[in-house]
């Protein structure tokens, strides 16, 4: 694996033409940012240049505020605010300017942090006369927190004036106010307090922590709402759970963060570099698939191409009431991602963060010594299939291990001079000859190692009076822990967000976003037509007695026992995907009087992907220095696919808020949404490249195979929302969506989808007498809604004649490779196909307890998906065509979700939080055309994920058990040859036979439902604490219940398989616990003598022939039903923030150092190399496996200027 420095990788990643464009774009963005910020600059030494003529003192105060971080507090009665003065200073400190400005005035000033408070001069006669003249008095006091600790820098302002002060280091203050004054006390993170002065001269105030629950807002469809008034099922994930993490993309970061958010990776070859996860909300939405709509700042996009550091919040809309406004795109939930932006009147902020990551593989198996591996195979072969390893071979393996060169010299054949195959050295080179066939290679240690990865992020944000900006750059490099071939993922991100107030009522924004991701991995498709599963298969077939390289430095092809050589295959080429995703969004908002607001946006996306597959011929070297092509790498191949999608979407909507008598809040929203996309795919393929080092279609001489695919899509929708809020007690919201989709015929193209939700804030009722310190908030809510699903094949209403290209050599050229274009007759179509409809019901409760320190959210839900596309009733065979599908299936999902959050401060230095979420669901097919209720497909009443299998309580432990069993039960449906160590199937229906009956629900023989492969009781626990400048957090996630049956293809579960070339044994795992009823010898058996006997084994008797092997592994059963539940430490972080007194000298705002770990611990009951979060791929092919989650150790820092 090649390791390059960051600069070189970025340079190579981006073409030269794009470099120029990026340089110009970045320069313009930075110039724009600094132009916006030019009138708001500030430095820590607080020097400023002023050239102001004939201005009032107030004007000069305002100018200083604009150019620095200072804010003035003063009582206008102390100053002649209309007095005209001039100031001419060049880089002078603010204090010097103030001394000049206030000279001759009867006032002075004090500077506390960023506040300048104008006070009377401390002269008794002046002070007394001022007090007497204005009838004022001076107050003193102390401000503390709820634990009695003084609060430094709390703000005290005389309400209705600019007269104010701040507390000192002891929390004390003094202020002079007018009679009848009201003081306003405030501090960030605490609730504001208003106190009338009246006759008091000493005022001591205790501020209470503000949990911000009542004022917290949630991003919902086409707007925001206060969380306390939300009536739908919505979860919010803040950036605190995402930043400084090591996962390469957003989908991996979401694991364990919210209840009902299901993420799986098994179908995507596991956690390979850059791996994305499939996302569903509340389980399976439809038998035809159902994933949530993902919106990034209001536009659909791929969240895995985002830089996670750019995310501000993520809202998850789960029920129909919250997502109905998005219509046909959102029948199974919505994920709303809001990215960061700058703030108006905020000085420039520059943040740079960097992570160095050390990645290591999950725990790996231990290979048996070669001679012991051979003996185990021989023992299995004695049971059936024949012993594959000869006695003399095992003797030589042992001798090689013991370095017995004399024995090897005598026993090995005397290979002739000039031989070109294995064992090719002339007599005398004993080690090389022996190493070719009798080595002891640990392929796991050779194949896997560690990888050093890194990521870097730079952001610039800020704003002026009428504008704000946010710019960011991000780069991620993730290399594979596999040590051979090219295997990496890189991503580069560039983002900007610029907002401008054209007038007081009109604002516009421009939001560009660019992503370039490159994924390159070994190409093994020529040999096996696969991917990572075949990489593991090659590793599986690399036996310990075969070396990686032969004595003359060439990869060893193998001799006699090895079926394939993995190293030549991995080195033969790469698959490379280069994705460029460019977004431009323009938004505008016009605010009219009386609460009316108009919003419009337009987004254009240019997405392109270039996929290149290069398969080179690998030449291996003979001992005589001649070369020959490795068999499964010929002929060489080159294939390139260009995919491009041009997409645009636009929304326009008006919102009207009306308040009547301060009690009735009404919301009216109406709008329209349009989107259209054009797709083009062009694919070219050739063989026989002349120059393999310059791979291209142009340099290949084979026959060109070219294919092109064109498609278009469009949707259109109209939506509205009605909201009603009575005194923050009774809440009502109705949403309506009228959608049209290109997928359906004209008569079925449009669908109407409504939703309704209600809520009741009980804590705001007059009768509610529970003190707030016990129950702070309490809300119950309910919702109902319908949404349409357009996820069916487009153009299914058209009688299409597919155009294909293939060899057809069985007609035109037997054994040839000529490509022929051909077509076939169209099938029968169903012009009545229409929307699938998802109807959701939801009941929820939200409670805030103990001053909102404890938050509890609970939901019950049901989703009924009707009119799913399924098989139709068959027609007579003379019809000569397949029957089209119909809208005739129904799926019901029921479940619940619980989210608990506790957050507390203990004193001013210590705080901690605990967040736990738990969810469960079950999906049942309630309608499906399967008149015979065949178990091999869906049927009415079938639970999604259910596993049918046989009951197996034990193995046959002796021949007597076998004979007694066969005298009563006929298992010939499974097999006819039974021996001790085979599994014993139970006759649960009592008919004296072991079979599956008619394999139907009514007659399933001895089959029964033995488990369910769907993940149940999914949970996440996020906890953390901070003490002074230290912070610590952990994220645990897992699955409480899941069953999985690994079939006969899953070598890494079973170990010894049906064929010696498909066997891989973990030398320290459960694989060695297999049935053995004979003493071992030097040439077969795990151990020699009686120590080999193991009749109380877990695994059955092994065989090396498929006929015998399938009876023990080929049928799902209770004994070998695996428990796939697990608990994983997903992330752990320890950080330290440098004290302000240290970093202020460096003119920095914030510096944080941190250590973070990902996937450091997994507790489960599965064998090594089987990741419980990625287990689907193990049943696909003999030796198949999925890439497990690597352990990642990260060190990083974040600096804000």
Image (cartoon, rainbow, N blue to C red):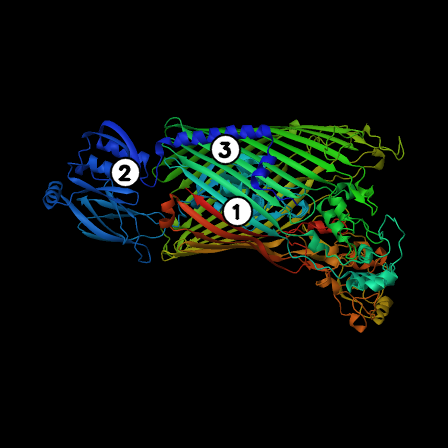
Residue 689 appears at what percent x and percent y? 77, 33
Residue under pointer 1: 355
Query: Upstream in the sequence, badge 2 or badge 1?
Result: 2
Question: Marks 2/1: CA distance?
Answer: 39 Å
Image quadrant in which the C terminus is located: top left
Horizontal and vertical percent position of residue 370: 78, 60
Q: CA distance from mark 2 to mark 3?
A: 56 Å
Q: Which numbered disc covers residue 720? A: 3
Check whether the beta carbons of the residues at disc 2 and disc 1 lie within 8 A of each other. Answer: no
Which residue is found at the position 85% from the left and 70% from the top? 959
Residue 1004 percent coordinates (x, y): 78, 55
Residue 394 seen from this side: no
Residue at x-position 58% and y-position 45%: 248
Mark toward the viewer: 2 or 3: 2
Front of the two marks 3 and 1: 1
Q: Residue furthest bottom?
A: 1090
Question: Is the residue marked by circle 3 packed among few (<14), some (14-19), or many (20+) residues within 10 Å?
Answer: many
Residue under numbered circle 2 = 93
* 643 shown above or below 368: above
Q: Is residue 142 at least partly visible in the picture? A: yes
Q: Nearer the viewer, residue 102 or 323?
A: 102
Badge 1 element: strand
**Quadrant assignment for the N terminus:** top right
Pointers 2 and 3 in contact (CB under 8 A)?
no
- Label 3, label 1: how far apart the Cα atoms are: 45 Å
Choose the circle earlier in sequence order: 3 or 1. Answer: 1
């Amino acid at each position: 694996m090649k390791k390059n420095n960051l600069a070189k990788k970025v340079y190579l990643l981006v073409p030269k033409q794009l470099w120029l464009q990026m340089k110009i774009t970045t320069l313009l963005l930075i110039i724009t940012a600094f132009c916006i910020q030019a009138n708001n600059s500030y430095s820590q030494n607080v020097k400023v240049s002023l050239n102001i003529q004939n201005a009032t003192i107030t004007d000069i105060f305002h100018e200083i505020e604009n150019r620095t971080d200072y804010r003035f507090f003063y009582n206008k009665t102390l100053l002649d605010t209309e007095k005209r003065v001039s100031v001419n200073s060049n880089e002078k400190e603010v204090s010097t300017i103030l001394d000049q400005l206030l000279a001759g005035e009867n006032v002075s000033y004090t500077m506390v942090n960023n506040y300048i408070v104008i006070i009377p001069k401390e002269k008794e006669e002046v002070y007394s006369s001022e007090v007497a003249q204005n009838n004022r008095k001076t107050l003193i006091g102390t401000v503390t927190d709820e634990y009695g600790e003084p609060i430094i820098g709390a703000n005290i302002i005389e309400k209705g004036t600019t007269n104010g002060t701040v507390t000192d280091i002891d929390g004390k203050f003094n202020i002079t106010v007018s009679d009848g004054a009201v003081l306003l006390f405030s501090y960030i993170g605490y609730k504001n307090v208003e106190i009338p002065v009246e006759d008091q001269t000493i005022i001591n105030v205790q501020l209470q922590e503000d949990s911000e629950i009542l004022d917290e807002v949630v991003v919902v469809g086409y707007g925001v709402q206060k969380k306390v008034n939300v009536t739908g099922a919505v979860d919010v994930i803040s950036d605190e759970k995402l930043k400084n993490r090591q996962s390469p993309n957003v989908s991996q970061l979401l694991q364990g963060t919210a209840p009902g958010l299901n993420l799986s990776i098994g179908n995507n070859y596991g956690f390979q570099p850059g791996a994305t996860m499939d996302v569903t909300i509340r389980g399976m939405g439809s038998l035809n698939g159902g994933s949530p709509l993902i919106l990034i700042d209001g536009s659909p996009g791929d969240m895995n191409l985002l830089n996670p550091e750019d995310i501000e919040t993520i809202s998850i809309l789960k029920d129909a009431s919250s997502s109905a406004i998005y219509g046909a795109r959102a029948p199974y939930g919505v994920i709303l991602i809001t990215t960061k932006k700058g703030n108006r009147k905020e000085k420039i902020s520059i943040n740079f963060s960097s992570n160095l990551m050390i990645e290591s593989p999950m725990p790996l198996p231990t290979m048996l010594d070669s001679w012991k591996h051979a003996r185990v195979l021989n023992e299995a072969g004695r049971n059936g299939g024949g012993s594959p390893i000869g006695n003399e071979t095992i003797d030589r393996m042992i001798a090689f291990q013991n370095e017995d060169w004399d024995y090897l010299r005598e026993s090995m054949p005397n290979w002739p001079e000039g031989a070109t195959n294995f064992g090719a050295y002339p007599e005398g080179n004993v080690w090389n000859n022996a190493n070719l066939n009798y080595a002891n290679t640990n392929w796991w240690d050779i194949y896997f190692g560690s990888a050093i990865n890194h990521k870097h992020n730079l952001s610039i944000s800020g704003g002026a009076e009428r504008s704000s900006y946010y710019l960011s750059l991000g780069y991620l490099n993730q290399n594979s822990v596999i040590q051979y071939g090219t295997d990496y993922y890189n991503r580069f991100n560039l983002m900007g967000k610029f907002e401008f107030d054209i007038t007081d009522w009109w604002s516009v924004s421009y939001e560009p976003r660019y992503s370039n991701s490159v994924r390159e991995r070994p190409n093994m498709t020529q040999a096996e037509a696969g991917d990572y599963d075949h990489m593991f298969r090659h590793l599986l077939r690399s036996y310990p007695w075969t070396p990686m390289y032969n004595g003359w430095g060439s990869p060893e092809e193998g001799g006699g026992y090895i079926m394939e050589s993995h190293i030549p295959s991995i080195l033969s080429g790469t698959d490379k995907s280069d994705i460029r995703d460019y977004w431009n969004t323009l938004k505008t908002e016009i605010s009219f009087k009386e609460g009316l607001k108009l919003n419009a946006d337009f987004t254009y996306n240019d997405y392109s992907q270039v996929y290149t597959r290069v398969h080179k011929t690998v030449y291996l070297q003979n001992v005589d220095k001649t070369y020959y092509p490795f068999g499964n790498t010929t002929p060489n191949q080159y294939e390139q696919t260009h995919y491009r999608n041009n997409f645009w979407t636009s929304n326009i909507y008006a919102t009207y808020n009306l308040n009547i008598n301060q009690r009735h809040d009404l919301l009216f929203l109406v709008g329209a949404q349009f989107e259209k996309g054009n797709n083009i795919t062009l694919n070219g393929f050739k063989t026989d490249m002349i120059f393999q080092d310059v791979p291209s279609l142009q340099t290949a001489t084979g026959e060109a195979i070219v294919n092109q695919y064109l498609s278009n899509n469009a949707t259109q929708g109209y939506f509205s929302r009605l909201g009603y809020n009575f005194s923050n007690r009774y809440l009502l919201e109705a949403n309506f969506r009228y959608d049209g989709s290109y997928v359906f015929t004209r008569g079925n193209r449009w669908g109407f989808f409504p939703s309704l939700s209600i809520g009741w804030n009980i804590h705001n009722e007059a009768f509610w007498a529970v003190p707030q310190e016990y129950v702070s908030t309490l809300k119950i809510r309910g919702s109902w809604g319908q949404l349409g699903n357009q996820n069916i094949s487009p153009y299914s209403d058209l009688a299409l004649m597919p155009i294909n290209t293939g060899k057809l050599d069985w007609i035109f050229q037997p054994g040839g490779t000529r490509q022929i274009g051909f077509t076939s007759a169209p099938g029968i179509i169903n012009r009545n196909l229409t929307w699938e409809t998802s109807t959701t019901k939801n009941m929820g409760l939200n409670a805030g307890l103990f001053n909102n320190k404890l938050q509890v959210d609970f939901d019950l839900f049901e989703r009924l998906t009707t009119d799913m596309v399924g098989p139709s009733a068959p027609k007579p065979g003379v019809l000569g065509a397949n029957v089209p599908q119909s809208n005739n299936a129904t799926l019901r999902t029921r479940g619940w979700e619980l989210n608990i959050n506790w957050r507390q401060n203990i004193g001013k230095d210590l705080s901690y939080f605990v967040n736990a979420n738990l969810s469960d669901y079950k999906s049942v097919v309630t309608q499906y055309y399967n008149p015979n209720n065949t178990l091999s497909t869906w049927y009415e009443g079938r639970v999604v994920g259910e596993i049918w299998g046989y009951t197996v309580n034990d193995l046959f432990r002796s021949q007597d058990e076998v004979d007694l069993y066969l005298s009563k039960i006929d298992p010939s449906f499974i097999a006819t040859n039974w021996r001790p160590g085979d599994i014993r199937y139970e006759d649960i229906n009592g008919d004296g036979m072991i079979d599956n009956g008619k394999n139907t629900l009514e007659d399933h023989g001895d089959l029964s439902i033995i488990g369910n492969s769907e993940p149940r009781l999914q949970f996440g626990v996020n906890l953390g604490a901070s003490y002074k400048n230290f912070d610590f957090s952990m994220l645990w996630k897992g699955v409480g219940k899941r069953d999985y049956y690994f079939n006969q293809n899953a070598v890494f579960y079973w170990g010894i398989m049906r064929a010696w070339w498909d066997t891989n044994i973990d030398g320290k795992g459960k694989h060695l616990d297999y049935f053995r009823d004979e003493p071992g010898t030097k040439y077969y058996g795990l151990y020699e003598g009686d120590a080999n006997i193991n009749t109380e084994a877990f695994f059955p008797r092994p065989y090396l022939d498929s006929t015998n092997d399938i009876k023990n592994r080929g049928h799902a059963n209770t004994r070998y039903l695996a428990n796939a539940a697990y608990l994983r430490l997903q992330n752990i972080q320890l950080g330290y923030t440098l004290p302000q007194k240290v970093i202020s000298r460096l003119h920095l705002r914030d510096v944080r150092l941190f250590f973070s770990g990902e996937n450091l611990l997994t507790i489960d009951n599965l064998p090594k190399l089987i990741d419980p979060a990625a287990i689907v791929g193990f049943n696909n092919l003999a030796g198949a496996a999925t890439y497990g989650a690597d352990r990642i150790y990260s060190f990083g820092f974040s600096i804000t200027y």
